[in-house]
Image (cartoon, helix red, strand yellow):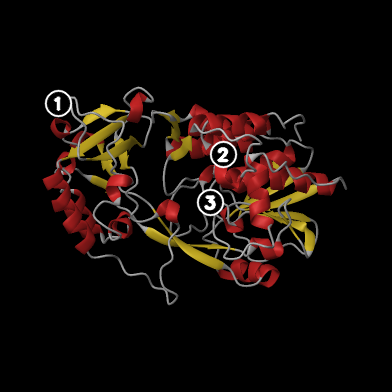
């Protein structure tokens, strides 16, 4: 049996790996290096764009539960992530370049995976396929997808700037992890109230890059540009990415008024990204405004933040819970194009699409994980025909069925939800 996987991002790589490990012969189609999307620049598979963080690993977090489920299902991206990880407190973060190289190496070494470097402009007329082309799909292939699924929906995503470690003024910064989770893995840039007010005033009046769209700007809450967040009010950032809780400045012994956190972006520790600082400001404005942060007054920016449009299909109207197309069950979709939002969510959906494509090729019944699991709940979210205003969804405990007995303590409740989920994994598909 042969399965075509179109797209070499996280979802496509996991789909190819899952299907090949279940006996399928897989052809993985990746258009790079012949063509790059506006957000990509590396020739390797599985390129991370907006962040190098794969979120928390703790079991009392939704991201941690999703990773644990993925490990039980044989994830290849988590193997690569652990091999290329960089310090990030309680989160799993990676060196982007090494991560992409490692995933590429893993897939190239699989005897049943053939990687074809070409741009797919027309879908195969027969056979089983998995479309994992990502939210930046355009051109002829986007037209093919519209013919299958109708008009796509869209939102905007943004990436944060990256600065050189050597240009950060450590006289105005300190190493620490929030609540001491990790080994002082973040560089923290404190601000006084006066410094914050100066920064805030500049941020909300800074000039933004134009978006060449006619339908207005709808942004995903999880990737909200910092200037859009700030426009909601002076205190919004203080309860968001600049919240000082869990941190104490060793120079003063007190909690700062506001803190900008920087997370290591490469294994050598020479690059750091501004956590939560996704932005659509013009590049000159980014330099001007972000240099008002005392520790970054002389910082050299190796990459400025950018914003790009993401598209996704109306999954509840067209997809089954096993990620197959209702009108043509030999076609599966996976990744952000289905409306799951986040690196690990995309990868996890690829695992399920790969498992089910392989099962369909063997004429076996496809599987949907129980709703008590994070992946099962996400599968149901994207296929719930009763969903009204369908929007992208991250892994979160709110989509799981409640526990039979209310647990007041949040962390204990989340841990119980995770333990219940992992208890349902009695079979590895």
Cβ–Cβ under 8 Å for marks 2 and 1: no
Identify whether 65 is placed above or below 225. above
Residue 338 occupies quadrant = bottom right
**Residue 368 location (% of width, % of height):** 74, 45
**Residue 158 location (% of width, % of height):** 39, 55
Q: Earlier in the sequence, mark 3 or mark 1?
A: 1
Task: Please name the residue that numbered disc 3 is placed on.
Answer: 341
Instruction: Give the Cα separation between the discs numbered 3 and 1.
Output: 39 Å
Instruction: Give the Cα separation between the discs numbered 2 and 3.
Output: 23 Å
In what element is the residue under mark 1?
A: loop
What is the quadrant of the C terminus in the image?
top right
Task: Please name the residue that numbered disc 1 is placed on.
Answer: 251
Q: Residue at x 37, y 34 (%)?
A: 266
Cβ–Cβ under 8 Å for marks 2 and 3: no
Q: Residue at x 53, y 29 (%)?
A: 412
Q: Residue at x 43, y 29 (%)?
A: 90
Q: Earlier in the sequence, mark 2 or mark 3?
A: 2
Q: Residue furthest bottom?
A: 214
Q: Is residue 98 left or right of residue 254?
A: right
Q: Residue furthest right?
A: 363
**Residue 348 location (% of width, % of height):** 62, 42
Do we see residue 293 in this rendering? yes
Do we see residue 105 in this rendering? no
Q: Earlier in the sequence, mark 2 or mark 1?
A: 2
In what element is the residue under mark 2?
A: helix
**Residue 207 location (% of width, % of height):** 23, 65
Residue 283 occupies quadrant = bottom left
Task: Please name the residue that numbered disc 2 is placed on.
Answer: 104
Near mark 1 (Cα within 10 A), the count class, few <14, some 14-19 or many ≥20, is: few
Q: Nearer the viewer, mark 3 or mark 1?
A: 1
Q: Is residue 384 left or right of residue 192?
A: right
């Amino acid at each position: 049996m042969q399965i075509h996987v179109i797209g070499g991002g996280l979802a496509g790589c996991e789909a190819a790996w899952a299907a090949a490990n279940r006996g399928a012969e897989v052809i993985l189609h990746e258009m790079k290096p012949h063509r790059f999307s506006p957000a990509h620049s590396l020739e390797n598979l599985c390129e991370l764009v907006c962040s190098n963080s794969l979120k928390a690993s703790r079991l009392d977090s939704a991201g941690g539960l999703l990773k644990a489920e993925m490990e039980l299902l044989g994830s290849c991206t988590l193997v690569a992530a652990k091999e290329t990880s960089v310090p990030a407190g309680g989160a799993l973060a990676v060196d982007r370049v090494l991560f992409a190289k490692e995933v590429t190496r893993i897939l190239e070494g699989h005897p049943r995976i053939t990687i074809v470097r070409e741009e797919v402009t027309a879908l195969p007329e027969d056979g089983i396929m998995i479309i994992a082309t990502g939210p930046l799909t355009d051109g002829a292939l986007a037209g093919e997808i519209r013919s299958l699924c109708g008009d796509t929906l869209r939102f905007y995503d943004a990436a944060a700037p990256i600065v050189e470690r050597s240009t950060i003024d450590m006289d105005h910064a300190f190493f620490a992890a929030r609540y001491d989770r990790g080994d002082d893995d973040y560089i923290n840039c404190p601000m006084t109230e006066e410094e914050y007010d100066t920064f805030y005033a500049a941020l909300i009046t800074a000039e933004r890059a134009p978006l060449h769209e006619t339908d207005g700007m709808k942004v995903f809450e999880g990737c909200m540009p910092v200037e859009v967040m700030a426009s909601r009010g002076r205190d919004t950032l203080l309860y968001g990415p600049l919240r000082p809780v869990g941190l104490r400045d060793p120079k003063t012994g007190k909690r700062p008024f506001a803190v900008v956190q920087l997370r290591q972006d490469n294994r050598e520790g020479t690059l750091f990204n501004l956590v939560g600082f996704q932005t659509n400001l013009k590049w000159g404005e980014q330099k001007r405004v972000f240099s008002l942060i005392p520790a970054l007054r002389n910082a050299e920016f190796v990459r400025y933040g950018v914003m790009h449009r993401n598209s996704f299909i109306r999954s509840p109207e067209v997809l089954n819970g096993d990620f197959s197309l209702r009108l043509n069950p030999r076609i599966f979709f996976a990744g952000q194009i289905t409306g799951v939002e986040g690196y690990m969510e995309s990868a996890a959906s690829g695992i399920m699409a790969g498992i089910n494509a392989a099962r369909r090729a063997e004429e076996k019944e496809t599987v949907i994980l129980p709703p008590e699991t994070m992946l099962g709940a996400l599968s149901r979210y994207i296929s719930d025909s009763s969903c009204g205003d369908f929007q992208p969804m991250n892994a979160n405990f709110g989509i799981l069925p409640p526990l039979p007995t209310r647990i007041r303590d949040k962390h204990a409740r989340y841990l119980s939800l995770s333990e219940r989920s992992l208890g349902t994994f009695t079979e590895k598909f």
